[in-house]
Image (cartoon, rainbow, N blue to C red):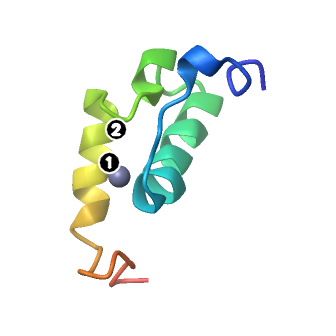
Amino acid sequence: MDLFWDATKWQPACDFHHNVVKQQLEHLFDRGAIAEADLWLNSARAIAISRRERSATGADGWPTDR
Ligand SMILES: [Zn+2]
């Protein structure tokens, strides 16, 4: 919650990154699996998740396999 209200940590995101990538990053962060710096959408961790999830996303942006 503290991080959420810190405007220096805000980053604009499209629906895909906000709903898919950020959700996974925040879940990992809550479990202590990644560092705070990994929460940025341009972190190596975020890019890896984006690539993995994008492959399951159709041209319309919706997932194709779930
Ligand atoms: Zn995006």
Q: Nearer the viewer, residue 64 or 19?
A: 19
Q: Quadrant of residue 46?
A: top left
Name the disc covering residue 49, or none: 1
SS state under label 1:
helix
Q: Which kind of residue does numbered mark 1 sit on?
A: Ile
Q: Position of residue 36 (x, y in %)?
A: 51, 18
Is residue 2 found left or right of 6 in the rendered image?
Answer: right
How would you rate the neighbour count of disc 1 (Cα within 10 Å): few for under 14, some for 14-19, many for 20 or more? some
Residue drawn at the location 26% of the way across and 40% of the way down? 47
Q: Do callouts 1 and 2 mark residues in contact (Cβ within 8 Å)?
A: yes
Q: Quadrant of residue 4?
A: top right
Is residue 10 found left or right of 34 in the rendered image?
Answer: right
Q: Nearer the viewer, residue 35 or 4?
A: 4
Residue drawn at the location 34% of the way across and 75% of the way down? 61
Rendered view: 35 above or below 65: above
SS state under label 2:
helix
Q: Position of residue 64 (x, y in %)?
A: 33, 84
Mark 1 vs mark 2, CA separation in Å: 5 Å
User: Which residue has dot 2 on it?
Assistant: 46
Q: Nearer the viewer, residue 34 or 17?
A: 17
Rendered view: 55 above or below 9: below
Q: Quadrant of residue 1?
A: top right
